[in-house]
Structure formats: structure tokens, C-alpha cells
Image (cartoon, rainbow, N blue to C red):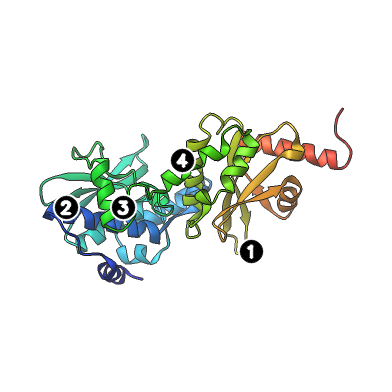
Amino acid sequence: MNKKELVEELRRRMPVFSGTDEEKELKVALYIDIELGRMKEFDEHYYFGNSKDIRRVMNEAVRNSENPDKISKKRKIICVTMAHLYKAILEDFGIQSRVVTKLFENGQIEHMANIIDLKSGKSISVDAQLDMFRVQTGMCLKNFGIESEYNTDVIKTKQLIQMLIEVGYIKDKDDFRDEKIEEVKSKINGLNCNEAVSAILNSPEIYKGNRNQGVVEAHKYYFSVLKMLLPDDFGRDVFLFQCSKQREEKEQEFSFGIYANVENIEDLEVYLYSKSKGRLLACDLEHLISLQNQGLKIGKNDLQRPVKILKSNMRKFKRKQIGDEPR
């Protein structure tokens, strides 16, 4: 749908909010933030791709940034297009905002977000793109009304939670996915890394209701899950890696996987993300090798530690299968 149709759809579905003018303005901005987070997904070619992909996607985003209709029709965005689309839609609801830009030292765009200038005189910082993976998994938002170098006004957690209830995002403060993730800690207590990864990825608390995620949002979500549940093991014995496959139309399809390193390669189990299922599914080394032979590329390059370890185990497994395991 174009921008006009998108705005009409938002107006039709948006609840009638109560409170002061400032509170109503904040709730409208929050509702739009959440709905855009559900409708869009981050462009995986920018997130996972090589430098050529990144330049191509960024250049296209900059060209489209002043054309809200074009952005509205696209499912995939990056921070540049999300910030400009959010600003344009807020304007249709009578809310003033600015797009703020963070640059690399070489002058290239690093990131874009928004500052909302409320009629009360307050200014709040909003990063709709960074919260997309949270919106798509029902986690608590971390980038609405935060402190930044561009503003001085901050929305306190208690106020944000109450607004999230009023806009219909959650029913109560215990309804966040964060709370359900915390519950999984009891399931993995005393387990080794391999067992813990299996328990986490097979827990309904983790994967249930995630079917409409973008691949990047799923990657960010599982990164967050592993950091929460296995803080000492993630990056040391538990790894997350990207993978891709070239399609006939010359468009790469990206995904990712998770595994725990083990001493006995017979016990090593890799989990690959299935977008259609909205979760990671178990894949043994034999099947992973078969997928690699069919064109699956594991990792961006072989220098990444998770990729080096996994491919080393795959080579050991192949040697063992043909009876050529070194003694």
C-alpha cells in the first residue's frame, strides 16, 4: 500500500487514546512505531551482505528516503528508510519530528533515527528500526523515549509499560516475551552447553508466535536470547553463524544457525533457522554437509571463529565417515 493507504489503515485500527494532549501525542507516536515494526523487516542484504551489497542497499535507501510512497510499498527497509517513513507518517497525524544522522569518520551514514518534538516543548528520541525485532517477538521496547545526544527528555520505564498496555501491545507488565525467556533458565540449570542450546531452541516460550519475523529480526532475537540465557558460554562455546544460498534469479537467500561446540563430534547438533516455521530446526552434520554440497554457504568467510570451528568439525566428521580419522 502507498503512504496514504497506510495512514488510513493506521487511523482505522488505532484506538482512541485518553490523557493529556502530551500523553495522547506520545501514544499515537508509540502505536505507529509498533505497527511499522510489525509491517517491515530489515533488509538482510544490508545486514548480512558484503560491502558491495551494503553500498547498493544504502544508495537505494538514500534515493528513496524522500519518497514515502515508495518506502511504504516496500517490505524491506534499513534505518534510513524507516526514519524517513516514520517522520512522514507522524506528520499526517500532526506530530512533528526530525531525522537525525550519525556518521562514520569518513562521512558515510552509520545510522538514522528520529527526534519527536512534542507540542508541550519536550523532545524524545525514537529508533523504530532498532526495536523491530523486539516488536516482532513481543519483547519490551528499548528505543522509545530513550536518552540520546539530541534530546534531554526521557520516558521512564513505568510510563512506557503503561503506554504499551494502553496501545494494546501487552495486557500487563508480565506479558513481555522477556519474562517468558527468563522462565527458560530453570530448564537449562545444570545442563552442558549442547543440552542447554537444545532445551532453549525447543522451548515454546522461545519460538512460539514468531512466524512473521524477518530473518534479520530473528537473528537479533536469538542473539538476545543467547546473551540472556547463556551469558558466559555465548561466543565461547555456543555460536551463532550466518549462512546463505544463491538462488536461480541471482538473489542470495540469507539465514543463520546456532550450535554448541562439543568434544565428541557425533554429539554435535546444528540448528538452522527456518523462516516458514519461525524457529530453528535441528540438523546433524551429515545433513549439513549435504546442504553444503547443494550450495549452502556457511559464514561470510572462513576466518570467523564460529565458522572455523564448525567447518573443522565437519571435516573431522567426513574423515571419520570414510574411516580416515587420524590416530
Tell us which disc is closer to us: 4 or 2: 4
236 vs 58, left or right, is right
Tag 4: Cα neighbours inside 10 Å, few (<14), some, or many (≥20)?
Answer: some
Mark 4 or mark 2: name the one nearer the start of the chain. Answer: 2
- Find disc 1 in the rendering and name its residue: 248
> On the image, numbered disc 3 is attached to which residue?
83
Decide: is 104 above or below 55: above
- Between the residue at mark 3 and the residue at mark 2, the CA separation in whole angstroms equals 22 Å
Which residue is rendered at x = 56% and y = 48% of the image?
A: 203
Q: Hey, which quadrant is residue 30 in on the image?
A: bottom left
Quarter of the rendering containing residue 110: top left
Residue 196 position within the rendered picture, expressed as x and y whole percent measured from the top left: 60, 38
Visible residue check, residue 218: yes
Residue type, numbered disc 4: Glu
Query: Which circle's residue, 1 or 3, is located before the other in the chain?
Result: 3
Q: CA distance from mark 4 to mark 3?
A: 32 Å
Q: Which residue is mark 2?
A: 23
Identify the residue under disc 4: 182
Tag in front: 2 or 1:
2
In front: label 3 or label 2: 2
User: How far, Cα to Cα, is label 4 from label 2?
Assistant: 31 Å
